[in-house]
Image: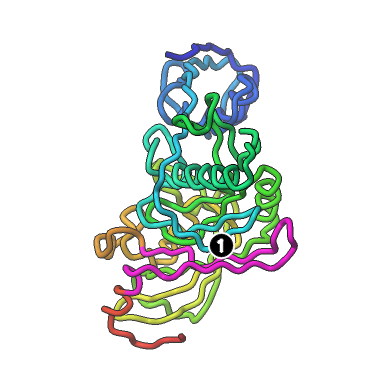
C-alpha cells in the first residue's frame, strides 16, 4: 500500500521528476523510480521523468511505503587484496551483486563484508578481553541486544563505488564513516585512478585514444544507458591497446568519470562492444558468460595516511583463456 496524492501543477516547463521532488520533499531518484514503475500519472496517463509539466496539469499517484531492508551478514569467502585499519580492498568475483536490494537480499558483497568485519570485531574483543560498543563496529549499527545472537545490521559498509554484477576486480570499502566521506570526496575530485582490462569486438586501429560523450538513460529502453546528444552526464574514457587478436582487441580503459555502465556504453558507441555483453554487445554477445571486463588496478592517495596506494587484481581466468585461444596478431605487452 502507498500514500496517494493529487496535485494541480502551478509551474510551467519544469521536468516532472524535478517538480514532484520539490513538491513532495522526496529524492529525485525515488520520484524517477515511481514514474518509471507506473505509480505516477498525468491526467490519468503514464509519463516519463523528463516530461515537462504545465500549469493546471493534474498529477496523481501513490508513494509506496518501503520496508527497511535488513542486512544479514553471511560468511562468504572474500579475496582481500589490501587491508589496513581504515580501508579494505576486495577482488570481486564474477556474478556477485555489490549492494543488497529487494531482488538480491542475500549473497551480495555487502553481506560478505558485514560477516568479515563482525568476525574481526569479535576476534579483537576476545584478544583484549573487553567488549566494544556496537556503534564502534566499522560502518555499521547492530540490531538486537547482542552481536553474537543472530546479528543483523541495518547500515551498509562504506562501499564508495560500484561494479556491475558481471564485472570482476578491485572494489574499495571504507571501514568507518569518516574514511568513507574522505574516499567519496577523492572519487568526486577525480583523485582515484582506475584501470580496466577488457576484450572488445573488432580490431581497434588506434594505439590509444579517448571517448567522450554524455551518458544517460536510453530514451526508449529504460534498462540501458546510452551516449546522448542532449542531457545525460558528461563522461570521458581513455583507452590503450594491449594486444590485437583474431577479430578482437584486448584493451586497457581508463575512465575519468564514473557514470553507470560508462565503459560498456562508450566502447559500444565506438563500434567495439565488450565481448559477452548481452546488453550492449553485437556478434559476440554470446561468446562469453559475462562481459569480459575487469577492474584491474586502482591508485589513489590514502585519505588518512597520505601515502600513495596502488592495488591490482589479477586478470581472471576467463579473460586469460579468451586471449590465449585467440590468434595474436600483434602485442604491446
Q: Nearer the viewer, residue 61 or 114?
A: 114
Percent position of residue 39, x then y? 43, 21
* Residue under pointer 1: 82
Q: Is residue 150 above or below residue 87?
A: above
Instruction: Give the tally of numbered discs.
Output: 1
Residue under the point 47% across and 34% down? 71
Which of 57/175 is in front? 175
Taking the image as shown, residue 183 lies to the left or right of residue 229, namely right
* Residue drawn at 25 percent across, 65 percent down: 287
Horizontally, residue 330 falls left or right of residue 161, namely left
Would you say 6 lies left or right of 293 here?
Answer: right
Asked whether 308 falls inside the magenta stretch, the response is yes
Most extreme residue toward the front is 129
Residue 57 vertical placement versus 310 (above, below): above
What is the magenta range? 292-320
Left/right placement of residue 268 relative to residue 132 reads left
- Residue at 40%, 32% (x, y): give it: 102
* SS under mark 1: strand
Residue 178 lies, in percent from the top left, at: 71, 45
Relative image position of residue 312 (x, y in whole percent): 52, 69
| Quarter placement of the N terminus | top left
In the image, residue 302 lies at what x, y percent? 69, 61
10 Å crowding of disc 1: few (<14), some (14-19), many (20+): some
Q: Is residue 231 visible?
A: no
Colour scheme shown: rainbow
Q: Is residue 242 visible?
A: yes
Amino acid at each position: 500500500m502507498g500514500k496517494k496524492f493529487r496535485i494541480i501543477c502551478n509551474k510551467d516547463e519544469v521536468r516532472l521528476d524535478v517538480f514532484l521532488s520539490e513538491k513532495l520533499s522526496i529524492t529525485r531518484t525515488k520520484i524517477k523510480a515511481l514514474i518509471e514503475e507506473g505509480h505516477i500519472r498525468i491526467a490519468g496517463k503514464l509519463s516519463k521523468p523528463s516530461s515537462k509539466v504545465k500549469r493546471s496539469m493534474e498529477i496523481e499517484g501513490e508513494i509506496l511505503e518501503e520496508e527497511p531492508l535488513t542486512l544479514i551478514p553471511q560468511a562468504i569467502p572474500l579475496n582481500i587484496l589490501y587491508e589496513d585499519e581504515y580501508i579494505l580492498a576486495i577482488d570481486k568475483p564474477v556474478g556477485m551483486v555489490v549492494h543488497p536490494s529487494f531482488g538480491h537480499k542475500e549473497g551480495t558483497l555487502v553481506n560478505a563484508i558485514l560477516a568479515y568485519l563482525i568476525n574481526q570485531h569479535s576476534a579483537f574483543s576476545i584478544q583484549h578481553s573487553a567488549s566494544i560498543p556496537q556503534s564502534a563496529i566499522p560502518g555499521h549499527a547492530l540490531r538486537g541486544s547482542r552481536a553474537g545472537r543472530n546479528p543483523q545490521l541495518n547500515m551498509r559498509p562504506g562501499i564508495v563505488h560500484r561494479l556491475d554484477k558481471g564485472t570482476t576486480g578491485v572494489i574499495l570499502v571504507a571501514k568507518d564513516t569518516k574514511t568513507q566521506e574522505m574516499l567519496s570526496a577523492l572519487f568526486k575530485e577525480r583523485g582515484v585512478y582506475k584501470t580496466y582490462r577488457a576484450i572488445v569486438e573488432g580490431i581497434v586501429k588506434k594505439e590509444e585514444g579517448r571517448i567522450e560523450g554524455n551518458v544517460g538513460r536510453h530514451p526508449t529502453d529504460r534498462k540501458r544507458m546510452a551516449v546522448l546528444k542532449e542531457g545525460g552526464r558528461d563522461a570521458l574514457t581513455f583507452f590503450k591497446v594491449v594486444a590485437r587478436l583474431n577479430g578482437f582487441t584486448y584493451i586497457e580503459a581508463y575512465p575519468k568519470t564514473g557514470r553507470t555502465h560508462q565503459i560498456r556504453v562508450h566502447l559500444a558507441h565506438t563500434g567495439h562492444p565488450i565481448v559477452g555483453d548481452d546488453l550492449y554487445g553485437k556478434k559476440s554477445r554470446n561468446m562469453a558468460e559475462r562481459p569480459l571486463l575487469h577492474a584491474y588496478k586502482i591508485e589513489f592517495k590514502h585519505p588518512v595516511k597520505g601515502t600513495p596506494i596502488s592495488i591490482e587484481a589479477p586478470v581472471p581466468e576467463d579473460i586469460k583463456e579468451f586471449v590465449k585461444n585467440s590468434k595474436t596478431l600483434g602485442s604491446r605487452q
